[in-house]
Amino acid sequence: MQVLKTIKELQEVRKNITGTVGFVPTMGALHNGHISLIKQARNENDVVIVSIFVNPTQFLPGEDLDAYPRKDEADKKICQMCKVDYVFMPEISTMYGNEEILIKAPNKSYILEGKTRPGHFDGVLRVVLKLFNLTQATNAYFGKKDAQQLSLIMQMVKDLFLPINIIPCEIIREDDGLALSSRNIYLDATQRKDALLISKSLYMAGSLIASGERNIKAVENKLYSIMQTLDVEYVAIVDREFNELKIIEPKNTIILVVARFGNTRLLDNIWL
Ligand code: PAF
């Protein structure tokens, strides 16, 4: 495995790669969720590139950019174990200069996650486009947990004719149902236990829909009743392109939940 730091190093390496390239973009602090993306990329491609870059442009002023967990050495070991070929770990000054061409995410990037984090998705799309251009990957792997991010990246690929396949990957959970996240480490024992109500509410909503319920309000009520002791920031029921739904559409519905535990926001969702 080779660790690449500069654009020149990555471009040199990329020039000499033949065959398919699987790319897993990350902000590091790798957990089993990332590992499953990397393993899938490893199974489906000749060469695997992982990027580890805590992207400052997707953090708003006052967010946890400085506190965001950084575990470079452990991350490199994990990549090595997963038989990654190249890890790209640039400095901020390598990725950003005085560029004037920016990416503007669409209006639907200002709802849900984008409402509490306005401008967040401009930063995500900006870095992801740069990384796609650098890696020229065949396939890029993204978790369904960040469903709005995934949908916007797919939209960017479609609108800008980017020659890359986006592969949506299943949410990885702890045995008790908690969706894996780099931010779970911020939870104390009580918060960690309370957080289980999020996945529980999503499963219960899933069963309600499986038993024939199509009414949005009824499903929302179910979710809120299970999470009544939590500080729920939002519950949303949307289609795969993040348009609001009038009724539940089987195979085209995503239910999203965000709840706050102190300063930690936990996201989870279920695709139905
Ligand atoms: O999902 C993430 O970790 C980040 O948003 C990404 C896609 C690596 C861009 O910085």
Image: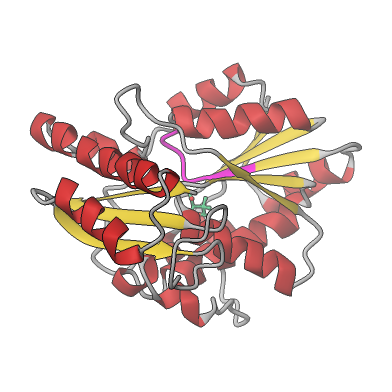
- Percent across and percent down for residue 126 are 57, 67
Q: Residue furthest front?
A: 212
Q: Quadrant of residue 238?
A: bottom left
In the rendered view, does 18 fall on the left or right side of 145?
Answer: right
Magenta stretch contains residue 36 = no
Q: Nearer the viewer, residue 199 or 154?
A: 199
In the rendered view, does 135 fall on the left or right side of 245?
Answer: right
- Percent across and percent down for residue 164 are 77, 54
Residue, x 37% and y 35% (percent of image)? Answer: 180
Which span is picked out in magenta?
Answer: 24-30
In the rendered view, does 128 fall on the left or right side of 135?
Answer: left
Q: Is there any visible trace of residue 77 in the rendered image?
A: yes
Up/down of 174 relative to 235, above or below: above
Up/down of 215 relative to 51, above or below: below
Q: Nearer the viewer, residue 64 or 106?
A: 106
Q: Quadrant of residue 18?
A: top right
- Percent across and percent down for residue 215 are 36, 63
Q: Nearer the viewer, residue 90 or 165?
A: 165
Q: Is there any visible trace of residue 127 in the rendered image?
A: no
Numbered disc total = 0
